Amino acid sequence: MKSVIGFLLLLVSASAFAQSPADALIAHELQSSRAYETLSHLTDDIGARLSGSKGAAYAVTWATQQFREWEIPVSNEPVKVPHWVRGREEAQLVSPAHHQLVLTAIGGSVATPAAGITADVIEVDSFDDLKTLGAAKLRGKIVFYNNPMDMDLVRAHRAFEAYRIAVAFRGAGASRAAEFGAKAIVIRSVGSASLRTPHTGALHYDPKQPRIPAGAMTAEDAMLVHRLLARGKRVRMHMVLTPRTLPDVMSANVIAEIRGSEKPEEIVLIGAHLDSWDLATGAIDDGSGVAMVMETMRLLKEMNLRPRRTIRAVLYMNEENGLRGGQQYAKDHGKEKHIAAIETDAGGAAPTGFTTTLKGDALAALESRTKPLAAVSSNHFEVAEETGADTGPLTAAGVPGFGLVPEPLHYFDYHHTNADTLDKVDPKELAQDSAAVAALAWILAE
């Protein structure tokens, strides 16, 4: 009996030895993941982390300390970030009947006068509509952009494509309407589901145009306003927004790395953004990504795996309303030899693969080495022009980019809302994501 047991132990040992490091990383992560523990602390114990806030500062301190506890070299690199603070947010229709509306300020918006704004609402569904109506009809009005996400695209698992189309009016809508004398704008929230939940996000003011207040209504309230206007009713809205833009604040990118054994000057970057919007705790955007990046580094250290090339983790600050962390990193490190940049900023649902800027023979050569990713359904690569916002300056300069693609069907149900909380993330799926990122980083570094 002892000889049989000994033989079986030898077989197990031989099997484990035969595993590639990528296979071993995936197996170990699926068996003993601590990614959800990391995410739980970031979301529940620290909370919302909008740039410039106490939560963002605490997140930098905590992440740095965590890497040190894992005995992974880490540093903070200064980044000056915007400090926008949300205030009162309220709105109601005052005609043709009184309706209380649910809305939120779009990030970066200026405030209304203290007493608010009361004006007629004019609906448009394109920027061309603004030109057609002209200043004669838009001056002094509240412009309502009614542009829902294309749910056919969402259901076809092309949610990010639907988002990119609809979000244009959030980003540029205020300045485009101000050009024609509008007093304020409201948009239909950019989301794929709603229980009267508004979705925030950033806007970008054109310095050539007046800055006017901007808010996002829930889908239900947007549909109400649309129905009333479609019936020929005169719709008047009262809106109060009191956000403030305070002086910029010094923050930091958190950078940790495991130096390469043979080519330490060549870098495989894995990145996510540490900041979140202020409405919730940013579990899917982008706490999950932070947890995956930190878990990759923890795994490599725990398993005593040292890659040929350096694997560098970057937790960027200020992706949500400025991208200054990504820009600062590129300024400070852009001349270094990055051979790949992996970004994870698309939630924590089950992995489906990666986007990549690689094409042709280069992609085919990589795919021949990524068979271990099939264990977590991540060995599919789709060519894309962009693979992440924070790594964008690197990929624009020619660094091969990769973006993790978790299942996107429900991502925009919660994105940028007060529902972006820990309960939206499944621990097993987060472990699968972490395994995919860790394995790809290892394969690229080897």
Image (cartoon, rainbow, N blue to C red):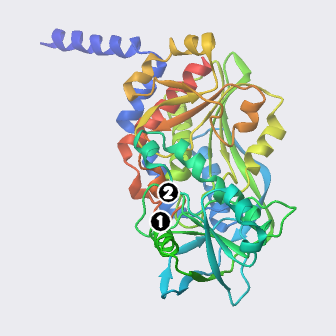
Q: Residues within 10 Å of mark 1 (few under 14, many from 20)?
A: many
Residue at 48 percent of width and 39 percent of height: 158
User: Going by the image, does 253 lie left or right of 226?
Assistant: right
x and y percentages locating residue 187 in the rendered image: 59, 65
Quadrant housing residue 14: top left
Give the residue type that dot 2 points to.
Gly
- For marks 1 and 2, the one nearer the N-term is 2
Q: Quadrant of residue 326?
A: top right
Q: Secondary structure at mark 2?
A: loop
Q: Which residue is mark 2?
A: 191
Residue in the foreground of this view, choosing between 120 and 267? 120
Q: Which residue is mark 1?
A: 219
Q: In this orientation, which residue lies closer to the viewer: 107 or 296?
A: 107
Residue 228, how many percent across, how many down? Answer: 48, 76
Q: Quick check: can you spot residue 429?
A: yes
* Relative image position of residue 206 (x, y in whole percent): 81, 59
What residue occupies the far bottom of the structure in this picture? 115
Marks 1 and 2, Cα distance to the nearest angstrom? 8 Å
Q: Amino acid at mark 1?
A: Ala
Query: In which image quadrant can residue 32 be found?
Result: top left
Q: Is residue 34 visible?
A: no
Task: Estimate the x, y position of residue 109 in percent, counting from the top left.
Answer: 71, 69
Query: Does residue 6 sit above or below 171 in this rendering?
Result: above
Q: Residue at x 51, y 40 (%)?
A: 295
Q: Residue at x 71, y 81 (%)?
A: 112
Quarter of the picture holding the C terminus: top right
Contact flag, marks 1 and 2 (Cβ < 8 Å) = yes
